[in-house]
Image (cartoon, rainbow, N blue to C red):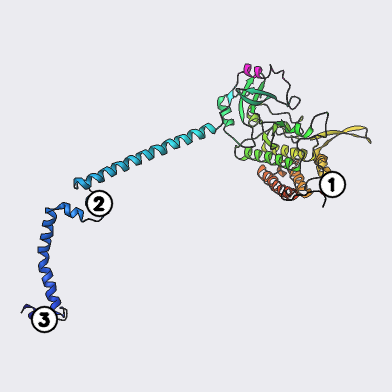
Amino acid sequence: MLCSRRRTVATRDPSWPSSPRAMCKSKSRSDALPSQRAASSSSRRSSPSSAKRRLPADASSSSPFNSASGGPSGVGGAATGSGSAQRRNTSSSSASSASSSLASLAAARASLPDPPVLYPFHELAAATNSFLAKRAGGGSAGYWRCSLRGRDAALFQLPLRRGAPAPDAAALARIGRFHHASLARLLGACPAGAHLYLAYELPPGAATLAACLRGPVRNPSFTALRTWMSRVQVAADVAQGLEYIHHHADTIHGRVSPSTILISDPGLRAQITHFGASELAAAPAAADSPYAPLGETAPSREADVHAFGVLLLELLSGEEPARYRFDRGTKEFQRVSVIETAAAAVEGGAVRSWVDKRLGDSFPVAAAERLVKVGLRCAAAAEENRPDMTWAAGKVSKVYLESRAWEQKLRMPTEISVSMGPR
């Protein structure tokens, strides 16, 4: 009877369900819902273990009730234990990462060189047999080979600058903080009397560039730099070292010459010594140095560029920067510089015959001509016509790469084997 009334009302209102059976089902479900809710809640309260058994396998991790710390002991306790274990794992991993970072920091600190020290005079005297040992490199521009505190060292003697305070530990630390592959490592210094002694770490098999170019007196045709690539490698190392001194260390060298450059073996790599000597020692007399520009007595970056230009021309030709030649017409000796001979070779197109004969004509002529022009521009008489070391280092590096490619083309292929025998 109830269903028939609802069907009559449903026919009048289109929004009502059209089927009386569906209306009766919805009504019966809504009426039964409170009783089912009550029964299910009472069953959950009466048997929590049965409800726990009906949970899926991953309900303990996905249910928010189980993750709460205030839940039943069987579920909440496990969650608390897993959380404490996770915290212990996190703390142990952070401790291990902290210990590894400390170990890496200690290794990086150990790899850094020791700061320069002030040597006592008696220690240097004991290492050089009271300075009676023979100097390597020859003359007063040479150095003593000695051992200082377990390290092989090259000890140079320079005149102290008049009126300047003796270098202290702070001055040495300021110089020693710069480290570059083309700079020899400063081990320490010792001001004694009117001289300043600078000790540099001596590379294995090292010799000055002057000794490598000139060779022994008994065999002037010998040279350690007997290949084109060895000459270009030394030029690139010196150029990059001076560029670092001028534009990264923000200072000057003041003593660029073959006597202040060490060549190590194997590899024939160049390292510049006397870095920072312009702050500690007196500048060399410009009249006595063929590397100093005429009319310029104070050390400067432009003077370093001029000295590098002369050194580059000397490196290419194998000649001394200045020598005297007897003129038969005037019956007098005339001073001839390597700058004049290089300029004459470029103008006459005779660079190939001007380059060092000990190379055996095994070099790229075009690359040699470009390097000669770089040396002449750096050694220009006018200060405003000289480039900076960034330009010079870039040009020399470009020639180095071209020479490396030239060497690769001329290298004998190793995958080809030739056998001689009867057929």
Give the structural element (helix, strand or loop) at label 3: helix
Location of residue 158 (image quadrant): top right
Which mark, residue 163?
A: none
The residue under the point 13% across, 78% down is: 21
Residue 336, percent from left and from top? 84, 36
**Distance from Cα at disc 1 to Cα at disc 3:** 121 Å
Q: Mostly what secondary structure, the magenta segment?
A: loop
Q: Is residue 136 magenta?
A: yes
The residue under label 3 is which amino acid type?
Arg
Q: Quick check: 48 above or below 100?
A: below
- Classify residue 35 as left or right of residue 365: left
As drawn, 128 above or below 417: above
Residue 22, above or below 267: below
Asked whether, in this view, residue 127 is left or right of residue 323, the answer is left
Of labels 1 and 3, the one closer to you: 3
Give neighbour class at mark 1: few <14, some 14-19, many 20+ (Cα, 10 Å). Answer: few
- Residue 266 appears in the figure: yes
Q: Is residue 26 left or right of residue 173?
A: left
Q: Earlier in the sequence, mark 1 or mark 2?
A: 2
Residue bearing mark 2: 60
Q: Quadrant of the N terminus?
A: bottom left
- Marks 2 and 3: which is nearer the front? 2
What range of the chain is rendered magenta?
Answer: 119-138
**Residue lying farthest front?**
423
Residue linked to disc 1:
350
Farthest residue toward the left? 1
Could you tell which of marks 2 and 3 lies nearer the N-terminus? 3
Front-lying residue, 54 or 282: 54
Query: Which is more N-terminal, label 3 or label 1?
Result: 3
Distance of mark 2 from mark 3, alpha carbons? Answer: 49 Å
Q: From the image, tell me which residue sits under label 3.
A: 7
Q: Marks 1 and 2, Cα distance to the nearest angstrom?
A: 92 Å
